[in-house]
């Protein structure tokens, strides 16, 4: 049986009630998204609340709204936030992003969205919702993000490398342009598996970055350690 929680340096994520557990993708996005000089953050599809909590740790000024459509996951994310040192700055809302209404404009929108576009649905409804794009697709994500971002705001996501063109083409439809991109490799010589992209409303040259996670099994690169050492217990 898997551990019902994941212990970080400054907070604990309970994930036994969530379809998608704590994983490298969420940690990468929470550590990589530019969080300086940010006051309003929106986490779309928060799941366990991991990314919201990481950003709260990184930025003591930020007020964070975390949206989750699944009621069970939303309840667990609320409890994770309440048990953290930043309960007063994180508001978890159980809502469909399509229906989310706010007068706020956000400096940063983050999302680790569902990533199976054409794969067969699995029989577990909760896990299916967390893994497939039927409830939160790229079209919806960028359409609403373009409406909710302030003029200098950024939308940051992590995606599988194979859907990068689809994602960028969809973002362009809503006048969101790549401003920073990180290609992630598990080990040297392996193909790129994940891409993190920061989009802005200003069209400018995109800053290109690369990150290799491991030199070999359980031997992490200095770059990965530097990115995640404030969070992982054993980094």
Image (cartoon, helix red, strand yellow):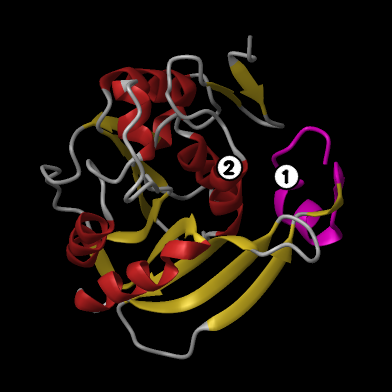
Looking at the picture, how far across and down is residue 218, in whole percent? Answer: 85, 41
Question: Quick one: SS at disc 1?
Answer: loop
User: Is-magenta flag for residue 218?
Assistant: yes
**Callout 2–callout 1 Cβ contact below 8 Å:** yes
Q: Residues within 10 Å of mark 1 (few under 14, many from 20)?
A: some
Q: Nearer the viewer, residue 199 or 20?
A: 20
Disc assigned to residue 84: none
Is 43 contained in the magenta span? no
Q: Which mark is residue 230?
A: 1
Residue 111: where, in percent of width, then height?
Answer: 39, 50
Q: Which is more foreground, mark 2 or mark 1?
A: 1
- The local crowd at label 2, few if under 14, some if 14 to 19, many if 20 or more residues have their Cα within 10 Å, is some
Residue farthest to the front, as pictured: 120
Q: Is residue 67 above or below residue 179?
A: above
Q: Position of residue 17 (x, y in %)?
A: 43, 15
Which residue occupies 37% across, 51% down?
A: 41
- Vertical relation: 204 (above or below) 191: below
Q: Which mark is residue 57?
A: 2
Looking at the image, which residue is at 50% across and 15% down? 16
Taking the image as drawn, is residue 206 in sight? yes
Q: Quadrant of residue 168?
A: bottom left
Residue range in magenta is: 217-235
Could you tell which of marks 2 and 1 lies nearer the N-terminus? Answer: 2
Residue 74 in view here:
no
């Amino acid at each position: 049986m898997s551990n019902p929680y994941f212990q970080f340096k400054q907070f604990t994520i309970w994930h036994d009630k969530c379809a998608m557990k704590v994983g490298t993708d969420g940690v990468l996005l929470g550590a990589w998204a530019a969080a300086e000089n940010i006051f309003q953050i929106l986490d779309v599809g928060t799941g366990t609340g991991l990314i919201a909590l990481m950003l709260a740790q990184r930025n003591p000024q930020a007020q964070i709204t975390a949206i989750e459509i699944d009621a069970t996951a939303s309840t667990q994310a609320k409890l994770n936030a309440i048990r953290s040192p930043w309960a007063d700055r994180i508001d978890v809302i159980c809502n469909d992003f399509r229906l989310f209404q706010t007068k706020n404009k956000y400096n940063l929108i983050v999302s680790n969205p569902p990533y199976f576009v054409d794969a067969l649905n699995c029989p577990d409804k909760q896990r299916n919702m967390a893994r497939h794009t039927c409830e939160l697709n790229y079209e919806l994500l960028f359409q609403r993000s373009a409406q909710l971002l302030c003029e200098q705001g950024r939308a940051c996501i992590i995606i599988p490398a194979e859907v990068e063109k689809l994602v960028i083409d969809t973002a362009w439809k809503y006048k969101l342009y790549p401003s920073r991109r990180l290609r992630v490799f598990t080990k040297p010589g392996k193909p790129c598996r994940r891409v993190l992209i920061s989009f802005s409303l200003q069209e400018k040259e995109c800053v290109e970055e690369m990150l290799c996670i491991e030199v070999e099994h359980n031997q992490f690169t200095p770059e990965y350690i530097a990115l995640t050492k404030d969070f992982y217990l054993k980094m």
